[in-house]
Amino acid sequence: MPFSISAGIGFIALFGVAVLNGIVLIGTFNQLEKEGWTDVVKRVIEGTQIRLRPVLMTATVASLGFLPMAISTGAGAEVQKPLATVVIGGLVTATFLTLFVLPLLYIIFNTKLHVKKPTNMKMLSALLLLCLAGSASVHAQQRISIDDAIATAVKNNRQVAINQAEIRSATINVRTAGDIPKTGLFAENEDLRPSDNKGILKIGISQSIAWPGLYAARRQYLTSQLKYAELNSEALNAVLRRDVRAAYYTLWYLQDKQELYGRLDSVYSDLLRATDLRLRTGDVAKLDKIAAETRFREIQAFIEQNKKDMVLQQQQLMILLNQNEWLLPVSSSLEKLAINVPERSSLHPLLQLQEQNIAIASSNIAVQKNTNKPDFSGRFFSQRVWGAQDPFTGFSVSAAIPLFGAVANRNKVKVAEAERTIAEQSLAYQTQLLQTQKASALTTIEKNRALVGFYESSGLRQAEEIIKAATLSYRAGEISFAELSQFLSQAIGIRQSYLDVLNAYNQSVIQFNYYNNQ
């Protein structure tokens, strides 16, 4: 479309509307600054939200008013159409510039940046490295689900690797059950200085062998130890699942607690600015500002303390998963765990280990009994007499009977039987202990579930309403800061108590599921 006088008039009208919208927006920013909004970014976001509707209404009304002229085809259309086209098309881009580019320019020109030439290059390098390290630590954090965390722990945990090495060692050790003593080679000369010049030389082999039942008992004993190592793998996985869930949900609880503190920090920051403004206008006493600033600093201290607690839990999770990255739970709110009650309760891996200890002790009794049986040895020899044509061959068999060590061997059997009794008593105690702990965890679940239900049904909603109503009343001057602080403390206490109770509930569910081998 060629430029004309009519299009030039359209640009004049467009410039007027665009400047008017910009003045309205900047005026709102300045007004918020006078009200105590010291943060430029927050001031721009709040002002843009407030003036979004007026700016859009101005552009929409003007565009709709010029729309019939833009689509006209009758007499005078050659004058009306360029005017309307410039105004409608320009208002679209002008509105975008007003709502996005103008606030950014406001932030740039209202941010005071003091750049000074560094006098110490070492200090500058240290600060640069610190910033790089900080950014690296932030970007190194990644979010992981609980299922992925458990799978990673079962795969990478160092205790799992140690257990696998123990299983391989026990498997190889079973192959040594048939260990037979070394074969002997001997050479004998019965007469070193014969009178008839006929010496006797005897050569041969000898072999000892234990009572045959000892080898079978030893194989059973070593096989029982192998099975113990395999069952220990299941017990280790159960402990890993419990520990990973406990650390993960504790970190999740601290993450939600950090978000709550962030909200409180924003609330008290706004209240501190409002109190400072009302102090300058003489509406409140200086004591209110001191109280508001103290509460604001306290929230800041809680935030820093919670960050340290999160770091400790992250380190615990990194050890369990054998990872070098800082891990975080999923971004959603802390969920409430479900109770898994199996239809048929299987024997807990810890009890299986105790039962296997009984089997090992029983196998050891068999080993000690067979050790008390006779051992056998045999020799095969060839004897040559100097001067004789043919050698003499023969063999000998002997049995070793434990005549003098019988009492000691019987005592070894009694020791093995006592060890089996100890293993049986340990199984009974461990069974009773697990049942007691399981019942205690279930009682804790029922106790915390009632409180969680109260907070979820009405407590959290009431806390949110208290915060909103108290904040609005204080801004309107209807209540004092002391009354506001009392209301906020009540609402904050409700939300904190909810997170604490929910975390206690989840931890008790984790313990209960562990006792059920879930």
Image (cartoon, grey):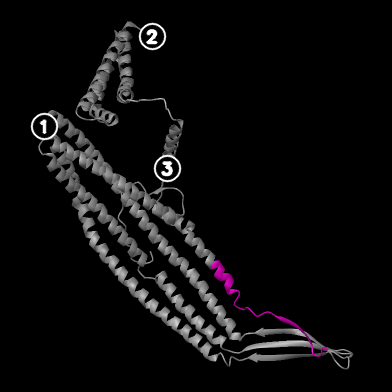
Q: Which residue is mark 1?
A: 283
Q: Residue drawn 34% across and 54% down? A: 249
Foreground mark, 1 or 2, reads: 1
Choose the circle earlier in sequence order: 2 or 3.
2
Task: Determine which quarter of the picture holds residue 445.
Answer: bottom left
Q: In the shown orientation, is residue 302 left or right of residue 166?
A: left
- Locate the C terminus by quadrant: bottom left
- Mark 2 lies on a secondary structure that is loop
Q: Is 189 covered by the magenta stretch?
A: yes
Q: Residue drawn 41% across and 45% down? A: 141
User: Residue 114: image x %, image y %?
Assistant: 35, 25
| The residue stretch that appears in magenta | 167-192
User: Residue 7: image x %, image y %?
Assistant: 33, 10
Q: Residue drawn 53% across and 78% down? A: 221
Tell whether label 2 touches label 1 (CB within 8 Å): no
Amino acid at dot 3: Ser
- Locate the N terminus by quadrant: top left
Q: Nearer the viewer, residue 209 or 401?
A: 401
Image vertical order of residue 118 relative to residue 443, above or below:
above
Q: Which residue is mark 2?
A: 2
Separation (CA) of disc 1 from disc 2: 62 Å
* Mark seen at residue 137: 3
Q: Nearer the viewer, residue 145 or 130?
A: 130
Amino acid at dot 2: Pro
